[in-house]
Amino acid sequence: MAEALFRPLTARDRLQPAWSDGRTTASVAADFVKASPGLGSVERLEIYARSYWFRVLDCLYEDYPGVRAILGQRRFMKLCTAFLAQYPSASFTLRNLGSRLPEFIEAEPSLSAPRTALAGDMARFEWAQVVAFDGPSRPPLSQDDILDAGPARLRVALQPHITLLECAYPVDELTLALKKRDSALRGEASNTLTAMPSSRATRRPTLPRKAGRVFVAVHRQENVLFFKRLEPEAYAILTALRDGRTLSAACAAALRDADPAVDWAARVREWFQTWQALGWFSRRSPRGRP
């Protein structure tokens, strides 16, 4: 049954006529699906297969609007179909369905070329939003925790719902442009039936060219999703803390080759005040686990 459901449908949303071993799908279906007076075994099985595929494709369609905009709807659906054929739903919740899409894009570049790198960055960024939306939270680090340990011994963990990303494209800016376009389209659609959407509202956003490294933290604050640009040194400190280094070691490694003309002590102090206010830090467990 699972094999039948997980095989991609034909272009007309039907079961494939041939089974994986060369037998006809009709003969295989008859072995485990009983025909009814109105429907044959294949027709009954198709109802379940269509329900599965329509649901999982719709889920990826909603979770990855940025990747969809980058590739276009036809190529996006082809990518998703190939992805689901290799990684079918294996969890009780559809929340986890697209967790491996970023690595699949990297492993199968022909499905997204020539925009593989941009699509991969966007997929990682959009999956990070899924994590931020319903990832767990731990009690935030208190001032007493900081004072008791001191910078040389203090090891902190980042909240599990925070994802730190290093991207080659400004996917955060592209996401904002897409949301602005979609809002314009919804505004046009709410007008009278005789009013056609303007060409500006329907124009596809300009895709960014490669613009060097971009560092972003995706997180939530009071149950609202946010993404925050980070300076390279701030990103280096946060990743080092996430990986278990002490506060002093993380700062020393991140600022080893930094511009000596900058007042890094003041800047780092400002960063930590912001991160602490956002509740990004929590205690590490005795074994070093977050």
Image (tube, grey):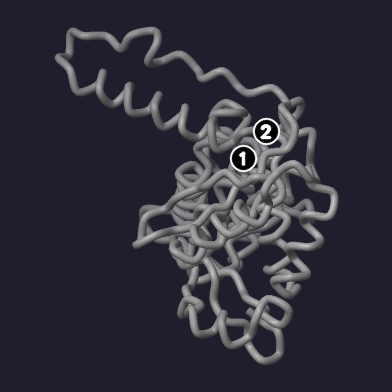
Between 223 and 118, the one lying in front of the other is 223
* Residue at image point 17% right, 17% down: 191
Residue 88, percent across and down?
A: 63, 58
Image quarter (top left, top right, bottom left or bottom right) of the N terminus: bottom right
| Image vertical order of residue 188 relative to residue 82, above or below | above
Residue lying at the far left of the rendered structure: 192
* Residue at image point 68% right, 68% down: 242
Residue 155, percent across and down?
A: 67, 78
* Residue at image point 45% right, 50% down: 226
Q: Is residue 229 visible?
A: yes
Reading the image, the residue beneath label 2 is: 169
Reading the image, the residue beneath label 1 is: 122
Distance, label 1 to label 2, CA atoms, is: 8 Å
**Residue type, label 2:** Tyr
Q: Is residue 26 visible?
A: no
**Labels 1 & 2 near each other (Cβ < 8 A):** yes
Residue lying at the far bottom of the rendered structure: 286
Residue 213, percent across and down?
A: 73, 37
Residue 73, percent across and down?
A: 54, 29
| Image vertical order of residue 212 relative to residue 26, above or below | above
- Answer left or right for 280 relative to 195: right
Give the image quarter of residue 74. top right
| Image vertical order of residue 217 relative to residue 12, above or below | below
Name the secondary structure under disc 2. Answer: loop
